[in-house]
Image (cartoon, rainbow, N blue to C red):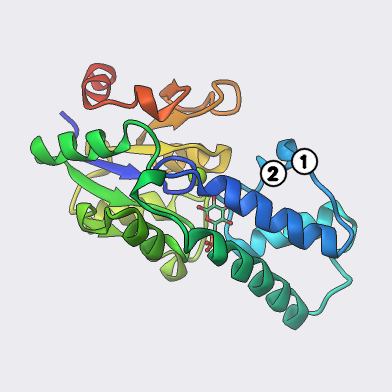
Amino acid sequence: MFKGVIFDLDGVITDTAEYHYLAWQALGEKIGITFDRAFNENLKGVDRMESLRRILALGGKENDYSNEEKEALATEKNDLYQTFIDKVTPADLLPGIPKLLNDLQDHKIAIGLASASKNAPKILKNLGILAEFDTIVDPASLKHGKPAPDIFIQAAKQLNLEIKDAIGVEDAYSGIESIKAAHMFAVGVGDAETLKKADYVVSSTKDLTYDLLVKIWK
Ligand code: BG6
Ligand code: MG
């Protein structure tokens, strides 16, 4: 049996992936770069500065800003993003997630968070589930973000688990890459084609039950 489940946050536990999109879009409009949801898929799971780099590259503007100006742009995006997450409440937990967390605890399965977001502790607190997590990886402590395996390896380490005993759950292409690069069992939430490197994909968190995890682990 698996001994731990390591979750991504944005797009798995709550729909903050949409808020990231809206905040980047607003910044993009201001600097004359428009992008759609398809491009936004490339930003999911990717840390703040790398997301900005990808947006600037899309607009052919990667050399138009100094590092200081880029920091200011990223801060501006984050300030807007934070106005969205300030309003997050337990009602924003995605369907099935509260029951899954309860069931994992009842079965003494460890719960970890492997999110690239520096806002993660605040979001978990607003969702009312901060205490359910046995560990949270600090993304600032890592050399390489997703798709590198570092964050899932670190989460397993913080839970005192071997990689082979853990399940990673992700909604992003870069996130599934990260879990598989760590050689961990990967469950994707979302589009089966985008997430085809996962060991199993559900289309919605509604399907992400304890019983399902037991079944697919066998
Ligand atoms: C990830 C999101 O969880 O966190 C990315 O999928 C986001 O879209 C990244 O860029 C960093 O988040 P934050 O909150 O530190 O800007
Ligand atoms: Mg995500």
The residue located at (27%, 25%) in the rendering is: 209
Q: Position of residue 160 (x, y in %)?
A: 18, 53
Q: Position of residue 70 (x, y in %)?
A: 74, 74
The amino acid type of the residue labelled 2 equals Asn
Contact flag, marks 1 and 2 (Cβ < 8 Å) = yes
Give the image quadrant in which the ligand numbered 1 is located.
bottom right
Q: Which numbered marker is on residue 28?
A: none
Q: Within 10 angstroms of label 2, few (less than 14), some, or many (20 or more) residues?
A: some
Q: Residue 218, located in which quarter of the rendered image?
A: top left
Foreground residue among 161 and 191:
191
Q: Position of residue 66 (x, y in %)?
A: 80, 79
Foreground residue among 114 and 190:
190
Please tell me whether residue 192 is drawn above or below residue 143 in the rendered image.
Answer: above
Side of 5 relative to 64 (left or right):
left
Residue located beneath label 1 in the image: 36
Whether residue 3 appears in this view of the structure is: no
The residue located at (36%, 39%) in the rendering is: 168
Q: Within 10 angstroms of label 1, few (less than 14), some, or many (20 or more) residues?
A: few
Residue located beneath label 2 in the image: 40
Q: Ligand 1: does it lie within 8 Å of the C-beta at label 2?
A: no
Label 2 element class: helix
Side of 89 relative to 99 (left or right):
right
Label 1 element class: loop
Q: Quadrant of the N terminus?
A: top left
